Amino acid sequence: MRRHLNTLYVTTENAWLRKDGENVVVKIDGDERGRAPLHLLGGIVCFGAVGITPALMGRCAELGVRISFLGRNGRFLARVDGPVSGNVLLRRSQYRATDDPDATAGLARNMVAGKVLNQRTVLRRTLRDHGPRMSEEARARLENVSGRLRDVTRRSGRAMEADVLRGLEGEAARLYYSTFDDLILRSHTAFSFTRRSRRPPLDPMNALLSFLYVLLLHDCRSALETTGLDPAVGFLHRERPGRPSLALDLMEELRPVLADRVALSLVNRRQLTERDFKSTVSGAVLLSDKSRKAVLTAYQERKRNELQHPFLQEKTTLGLVPFIQATLLARCLRGDLDGYPPFLWR
């Protein structure tokens, strides 16, 4: 089993990263603020104006440590990668599958089912753990949406076209987010959720979700590239220049587990307040520099949670699930598996 490697997140503006032996050293205003062995890192993510020496970039490329540059608000800017991993035969199988409507629909069908069932699990867990403390109206809404998500799952199992499955995935997302406010147990208007807004996020909860989705997308893209798949050529998401469609496919079933639960925990446990967010002139709401660190810490802790993988029946951590799912997808495309087994959270 692949070892769970850490991700180094650098959020301080004007930080400088350099190589010292087999370590990465972080300097701020000329003072060393931290160092980490390169062999323990799976990736480095830099927010804002962060500098890196060519020697460090070269060594990271040799070791397969991917470096990602994001804007201060989490918008993807660029990546530094070494040689493309994997073999051409796997990628050719991937490309042939995307040109086959039946193969595309088969893979998209399982991805949609995995996402919808995991969304339903989030609702069912809230009812189980917090139902007695919720209002009767909130419980009724969660029960209703839970049943409708189950119906979407049944219909997705019969859908034979990718476009139909994309429509069902959109329907499930609307249902799920329609009751997301009921999952926010603290009574505070700052975290009220009315609808999903992305570009830009217009309230604190949407800003938190968008930030976590960026982190999850980075992990999914890295997992696919490590496995040898092309992250730009997907099945559920249509291809678009500059869009990591397959990484978006892979992250769909993991959003409820690795991102939504972290966001809800941070808010419901009062680890974030409205002071952790700031509004821009354009109306966008963003996480403050200090609060980003709290979110990154919670995300890393969530990735260390252990569980038994439902398909492999082996104990692993949540942080390794993207790599496991990418490997299962590769095995499916090679013909080693009859179908893609999505990750189902229990």
Image (tube, grey):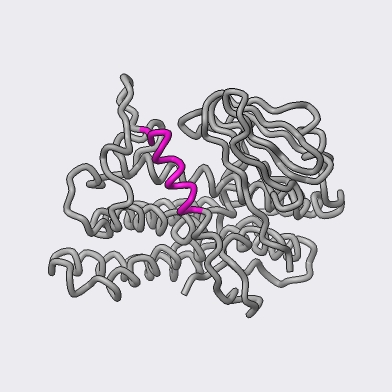
Q: Main secondary structure of the magenta part?
A: helix
- The quadrant holding residue 199 is top left
- 301 relative position to 3: left or right: left
Task: Name above or below for residue 212 compared with residue 28.
Answer: below
Q: Number of marks in the image?
A: 0
Q: Residue furthest bottom?
A: 313
| Range of residues picked out in magenta | 286-299
Residue at position x 67%, y 56% from top? Answer: 5
Residue at 64%, 55% (x, y): give it: 104
Check the image and name the residue furthest to the front: 31
Residue 234 pos. (x, y %): 64, 48
Please name whichever residue, 59 or 110, is drawn nearer the observer in this view of the structure: 59
Q: Residue furthest left?
A: 136
Which residue ends up furthest to the top in the rendered image? 281
Q: Nearer the viewer, residue 100 or 321?
A: 321
Picture quadrant where residue 198 is located? top left
| Vertical arrangement, residue 259 with respect to residue 28, above or below | below
Q: Nearer the viewer, residue 171 or 173?
A: 173
Query: Residue 75: x, y in percent?
Result: 51, 32
- Would you say residue 284 sits in the magenta stretch? no
Is 298 in the magenta? yes
Name the side, left or right, on which 91 lies relative to 193.
right
* Residue 178 vertical placement versus 190 (above, below): below
**Horizontal and vertical percent for residue 187?**
17, 53
Q: Which residue is at 42% across, 34% downward?
A: 289
Q: Is residue 239 left or right of residue 344?
A: right
Residue 183 image offset from top left, x and y in percent: 28, 59
**Residue in the foreground of this view, choosing between 308 and 297:** 297
The N terminus sits in image quarter:
bottom right
* x 62%, y 40%: residue: 34
